[in-house]
Image (cartoon, grey):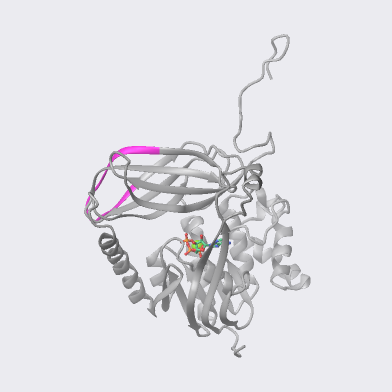
Amino acid sequence: MTEVAPGQIRGRGLGRRFLIRLSHSRSLKEAILRRELPKTREIWALRDVDLDVEPGEAFGIVGRNGSGKSTLLKLLAHIYAPSTGMLAVGGRVGSLIEIGAGFHPDFTGVENVYLNASIYGLKRTYVDAHLDEIIDFAELEAFKDAPVRTYSSGMYMRLGFSVAMHVQPDVLLLDEVLAVGDVAFQEKCYERIWEFKRGGGTIVFVSHDERAVARVCDRALLLEEGRQLETGPAAEVVRAYHARLAGDTAERAASRNGEPSGPCRVHEVRAVAGDGSIRERFTEGEPMALEVWLYAEQGLEEGRVSVGIRDSAGNDLGSQTVDRVLLRPGQLERLRLHFPGLPMREGRFVVAVAVRNGDGSTELAVADPALELSVFSEDSAGGGPIRLGGSWELPGGDSA
Ligand SMILES: Nc1ncnc2c1ncn2[C@@H]1O[C@H](COP(=O)(O)OP(=O)(O)OP(=O)(O)O)[C@@H](O)[C@H]1O
Ligand SMILES: [Mg+2]
């Protein structure tokens, strides 16, 4: 492997393949009777990516949902090994990739600082000396002895960020996570990131917020379907990304001629919490809105938009469809599906979105998976995917 200096990253021909199992809909008995093997499909989340990041540089990664950004960061963090290619990352790596990763839900904030730091290879004595600073920065003094499963997404992020900044990394990896913090804390993070950069640290930064990319990054990489489309000055790459989004729709038009309403796509799907923050972790019963951004090149007169949710085993939990959606031509349009309280109890869930024509006969655009959500339960009352609720009436007429 190539020798690299601390803070330097060299990647050549990087690829990462995943095998996913398809179709859980048949019962095991049926599958055995039919002598079927589980069907798998191969996904190349990344393909043939070259990466050169120099010490002290801030490097952005942009691209649509599923384009491979997080996968690339996970390679850099050594969470995944590359399936192809060669990668060298110099020095210590601090990362904030998935909120809650590296934390144990039943441990307290303080215990998790030790756990997280040990994953980074830090000595206990170092953590002893910096513990107060870490908790302080995260503004979690009052919650440090509570198990982190009771934390909000923003609190998780604060603690994760604070630990990542205190491990004195040479390379800092950040994936979209700052978005869950409130505005004041985000500002504080950006301050800290600047400071880190001024001190000569290397940053690799994934964000859907293009202003943030332009603000933080010197150079950037544009991914599409796992492939590297462009690398260059951050502002140029962000521009290329926008141009690509527009061009995309033209390409689809060519491949789908004769469609009544012209090409259409699901641009982005995200989950917005009650306080307006965008995140993927929620607590049962929390208010949440699924925000669906759609784009129809030539507009759509009467669209039918469906949102479906599956559990991690692939079982459909429910769906919602809205008819007669009007999309203006050439504009990103937003729909929101509001939930006053999330109906799922606990687990990981996949959200899928489909757009059909007025009578539902033609699928115009689909995003599946569009989004993955984690939901945590506040307590352990009952089991199963939903909170059954209801009230008891006992013999003798008492209620409980
Ligand atoms: N552990 C995994 N197992 C199977 N497939 C995976 C896994 N991780 C990622 N993928 C697939 O690889 C592709 C790239 O995913 P990745 O999470 O890197 O995208 P992303 O650019 O970070 O998207 P987003 O903007 O939604 O965060 C997707 O098709 C995804 O389904
Ligand atoms: Mg991602």
Residue 212, x across and y down, in percent = 41, 67
Give whichever of 252, 271 is nearer the camera. 252
Instruction: Indicate whether 311 appears above or below 251.
Output: above
- Left or right of residue 287, residue 29 in this image: right
Q: Image point 55% across, 69% down: which residue?
A: 17
In magenta, the rendered stretch is 321-334
* Residue 134 position by quadrant: bottom right
The image position of residue 127, as x and y in percent, is 73, 69
- 121 lies left or right of 3: right
Q: Residue 336, image x and y in percent? A: 38, 44
Q: Is residue 400 above or below residue 7?
A: above
Residue at position x 64%, y 37% in the image? 384
Judge whether residue 333 is colored magenta.
Answer: yes
- Indicate the quadrant containing the C terminus: top left, top right, bottom left or bottom right: top right
Taking depth in this image into account, of 395 and 152 the one nearest to the observer is: 395
Report whether residue 60 is seen: yes
Counting from the top left corner in percent of width and height, residue 48 is at 48, 78
Q: Residue at x 47, y 51 (%)?
A: 277
Identity of the residue drawn at 29% across and 38% down: 359
134 left or right, relative to 244: right
Does the magenta-highlighted stretch encompass residue 98? no
Q: Is residue 176 visible?
A: no
Decide whether the magenta segment is chiefly helix, strand or loop.
strand
